[in-house]
Image (cartoon, grey):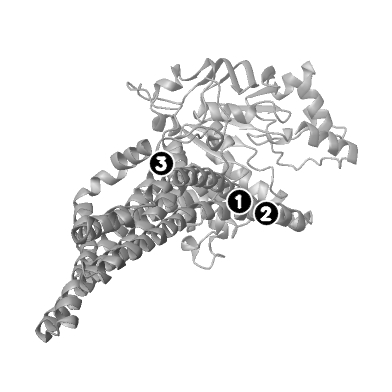
Amino acid sequence: MTASNTPIQDQTENQPSGQLIAWLWRGYLKKHIPMMGLAVFFMFLEGSTLGALSYMMQPMFDDAFVAGNSTTLYWVGAMLITIFVVRAISSISQKLLLTTIAQRTAAALRIDLLAQMMKQDGAFHQSHPPGFLIQRVQADVNAVGDVWRAIITGAGRDLIGLFILLGIAISVDPVWALLACVGIPALVLPAAMAQRYVRRQAGIARDLGAHLSTRLDEVFHGIVQIKLNALEQYQSRQYKTLTKQFVRTEIKSAFGASAIPAMVDIMSGIGFMSVILYGGSEIIAGEKSIGQFMTFFTAMGFAFEPLRRLGGVSGLWQVAAAAIERVKELLEAPITLTTTENPVAIPDGTPKVTLKNVTLAYGHNTVLHDLSLVAEPGKTTALVGASGAGKSTIFNLLTRLVDPQTGAIEISGVPTPDIALNDLRGLFSVVTQEALLFDETLRENILLGRTDVTDEQLKGVLDAAHVSDFLENLPEGLETKVGPRGSALSGGQRQRVVIARALLRDTPILLLDEATSALDAQSENVVQEALDKLSAGRTTIVIAHRLSTIRGADKIVVMDRGRVMDQGTHDELLKRGGIYADLYRLQFRDGKQVSDVPKQSKFGRSTDAVPVARQGILERMKFKFFG
């Protein structure tokens, strides 16, 4: 299957609200039924207090104030205190319960989102930048949690209170109640239009928020390059443009969300005017008492506020729906790389790695063309070629970060899809020039969650990887925080930490991707010595642009545009000429023959430090072009 590079936010279409509610209920809210039931009980109490308060108006006015009965005044006062105490307790209880449900739901969504996104293949992460995914995990999930709590409160407390208050108003005079609601039918069409408008603007705002997060992620991670290239004003303009679009969209969404409560206010005014004109004439005629009118007026006054909030809930739901849609899309995105139901056991011994007629494409871009190669067990195989030749793609295929469209990848004769995914990746240790570290202690960056490592084992890998050389200079030793992406360490120190990880993993296959290319000469010598120890007895595959690092490899595979063009030892390839010989002549201009090069380490590093002539600007440009 060809990997898709279409971002999810470009595929999202509005889904029916019923489907979204049902999905959220089944997956995350249903488990909180007992707590929600208790919250609904307290919401019923809180909503009922408004009805009880309005009901007390008639005895207070007719029996206490008009009739002058002081006894009634006392018991009415006592009832009012009781009503407000019950209202306070029920309000605190239901808010605490709903907040608990909302936070637990949001936490479950975040955990599931992160787990799902870590299962996705490389094509998914190429088309969905980190800022976009962070926006989904943080901002969208927060929006779901906050708005859902408001919706539950509105649907519970306000809806219960509204029905009770309308019941009291109808009990006083059904005609008055009908007149008070005379404007409701006029709300239906405008409210529907406002809902669609809010849903559309909220969706745009969610996507713009993701773009803003992506921009910030790129700025903060590329701050050095921004400063060196004087890009501060350019990046500020880019961010300013996105921010203005985001603000305009949020304002439009807020306008649509506030339009529905505003229409409720207008309808309330029309209803009250109708009741005053009709009911006032009945009071003047003596057909109704002041107490009845105050009970009705209080009930309807209290009823219109819940009705107004319920109108606002409609707009809030549209905002939540836009966020839920995007979260749901990510959670339901298909996982293309899965473990077979009947995995094969990991082969014993030092593995042999084989690629047979492998073709891989991302969309319409074919990266590997019918490629075949073999890495012999316990030997070092080097991959060389220009940038874009497909060398790093081979690493991704071996570890099943991506699967090919055709062909087979085998470990000691077993196809990689037949091996359990965790078992397969447990065969590999990978050391790259990026040397990614986490913002944790040095110890945690080496152990990576393992608890079965003894102090003796840890000291052994620290010594072998030359981490011990700089450990005493760190303020807290192994407990020193290395900073975001290991920023508190030098490039050579980060590489040694990664090598220590690989030594601790003790896997039979080692993948090296330009592990020393970004280091100075002194750091490279130390790291290269650690790599020599690491590769001993392992099937090693090396990606190299600098040919000096792989002259001693057992086999060198020359690649160009996704194809194997040649393979052999260093001497064999030079004798045959071709791409490898051209690359070698480009990088070595000291006039020496290959046979003149003194003794080498396994990866070809000269122990007598053969000088490499300084290249002119044209040679350096050619070297840059060829990678």
What is the secondary structure assignment of the residue under circle 2? helix
Q: Between marks 3 and 1, how big is the CA–CA gap?
A: 23 Å
Q: Between marks 2 and 1, how big is the CA–CA gap?
A: 7 Å
Up the image or down, 104 lies above or below 113; here it is: below
Amino acid type, callout 3: Ala
Up the image or down, 547 lies above or below 220; here it is: above
Using the rendered view, name the quadrant where residue 273 is placed.
bottom left
Query: Mark 2 sits on what residue?
Result: 239
Instruction: Kindly indicate whether the residue at mark 1 contacts the one at mark 2 (C-beta within 8 angstroms).
Output: yes
Amino acid type, callout 2: Tyr
With 130 as the anchor, is 387 left or right in this view? right
Mark 1: give few (<14), some (14-19) or many (20+) Cα within 10 Å: many
What is the secondary structure assignment of the residue under circle 3? helix
Residue 467 vs residue 365, the one in the foreground:
365
Residue 484 vs residue 17, the one in the foreground:
17
Query: Mark 1 sits on what residue?
Result: 212
Amino acid type, callout 1: Leu
With 297 as the anchor, is 127 left or right in this view? right
Q: Provide residue 188's location: percent of width, then percent of height.
A: 41, 44
Q: Which mark is residue 115?
A: 3
Question: Outermost residue, left direction?
Answer: 71
